[in-house]
Amino acid sequence: MSNPSTTIGSFVDVGWGRLIFAHTFPDPQSVADILLQEQLNRRDIAFYVNDPQLVLRVAPQDLFLDPSTTYRLDLKTWKRQSQIDSPIRVTGVESKKDIDEINRIYSANGMVPVDTETVWQSREDDRFKYFLARPQDSQEIVGVSLGVDHTSCFDDMFNSSSLWALAVDPQTKYPGVGTELVSHLADFFAQRGRHLMDLSVLQESEAAIRLYEGLGFERVPVFTVKRRNQINEPLFVAQDVQEGYNPYAMIIIEEALRRGIIVEPIDPPRGYFRLGHGNRRITCRESLSDLTSSISMSRCADKQLTAELLSNVGLSVPDQIAYTNDQKASEFLKEHGRVVVKPLEGEQGIGVAVDLQELEEVLKAVKAASAHADTVLLEQFVAGIDLRIIVINMEVVAAAVRKPAEILGTGRHTIAQLLEKVSRRRKAATGGESQIPLDEETLRCIRSEGFEYKDILPEGMPLQVRRTANLHTGGTIHDVTPQLSDTLREAAVRAAMTLEIPVVGLDFLVPSVEGEQYYIIEANERPGLANHEPQPTAERFIDLLFPYTINDPSG
């Protein structure tokens, strides 16, 4: 934890790497030398580099100038902007399980995980401290930040501090988590008598910059140098090949590039690209590749055919009919009491209405769904946990519970304002893929609870605003792969084998992910492989496409 006696200059190991105070080192050579000692799978940061060009000159092939901007907060004049009670409280690390949650949030945000023992053993270290954001009424962790006290690290003439590794759970329903973490850290260091608090942020992180500038941070000319490694690669390698792709394509492209596979952009807006290694070429549209046949695709696209095929091999599926007339619809509703209406073909929850109990609602939903497909299905409503299972090469790779979009009242904002806030956060966390649509289905869900868009939701009150849990309509995803029962694993693999498809996302409804009861609702031939952290979905996909690169030394 402490600096080696042979090292001239100050640094601190914060768990994900070393924060190196470059201005405490005697010359550019010594700054470069310590960066070149970076350990595998860590991210060291040399901050306050006085002469970055001279440091880079020492090892131009190994070091690079970080393309981040430094912001500074004057703690001598710092004051919280609002005294309104927050739904969030901030604590320190209280257990090793907390550190697991830190790494879950960092992983979900594409950040470097921390070393558990380093963080656990440093709880009383005056030099740095991890702060955790929790709801007022639970131990759940929804955000994390790191504060470093420079005066405790070295003889700092500026009496300063810094904020690092701020991350918010991209799936949280709570507003203002980042603001509370930053404000708490500013209070913490101001109470310690520190004069300044600095942070480093990428210029494209527009939401974060708005947050910092809104709290009073100002830009300062401070330079940062890092080592060229796999973790930092997006910061120093031209991203032309990846421009325009969504997160579902990007996760595959990045894994391919890591293995030395050539990526040829074809149509980024539609997710098309071609992968090449040796004499093998495979065209992909996100997770859909040449290896998936047109027969398999048509079996998944036709939801009625999917159900029939799975039912024929003894797998559990809900009862289902195609809408033909109002009388048949009425009879089906009377038989089951609660129904789902959805287009025969389609994805991302478009045109789907769930848990309809009145004939008028059913017929209205049929009309809406018919805008997306010629045939509309009525399906038995099944209550349960919405579970997505990813099967690649006839093996279960990931399983995640999907939860419908939800907002949390503040007592100050209208439902429309809360929807906009949650949508903005979900959109930022998923590369623009997830947001809550302001459509008839959202309005129906809100009105079923007695509210309108213009109403102010009482403080602390949760409100589910969608019935389906699709990511594209604001749903959230929570990994449950380790808890998945053998029965559900076997059902998923059997379904993939029945559909004869090498990559598939199967939608289950289950009472418990550890149980034996289930219904298979749909099969998606182009499942999103992102947002399943920490499961290796992209790795297994590339294994399927290029099996001889699994242990390729060029990867």
Image (cartoon, rainbow, N blue to C red):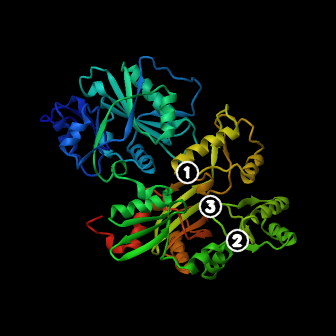
- Of residue 241 and residue 378, the one placed in the foreground of this image is 241
Give the residue at mark 1.
432
Badge 1 vs badge 3, beta-carbon distance below 8 Å: no
Numbered circle sitting on residue 344? 2
In front: 213, or 470?
213
Using the rendered view, name the quadrant where residue 3 is placed. Answer: top left
Q: Secondary structure at mark 3?
A: loop
Q: Residue at x 61, y 45 (%)?
A: 423
> In x, y percent, where is residue 316?
63, 74
From the viewer's perspective, tell me whether residue 521 is left or right of residue 545: right
Q: Which mark is residue 348?
A: 3
Q: Position of residue 262 (x, y in %)?
A: 36, 66
Choose the circle earlier in sequence order: 2 or 1: 2
* The C terminus: image quadrant: bottom left
Q: CA distance from mark 2 to mark 1?
A: 26 Å
Contact (Cβ within 8 Å) of mark 2 with mark 1: no
Q: Looking at the image, is mark 1 or mark 3 nearer the viewer?
A: 1
Amino acid under disc 1: Gly
Spatial CA distance of label 1 from label 3 is: 14 Å
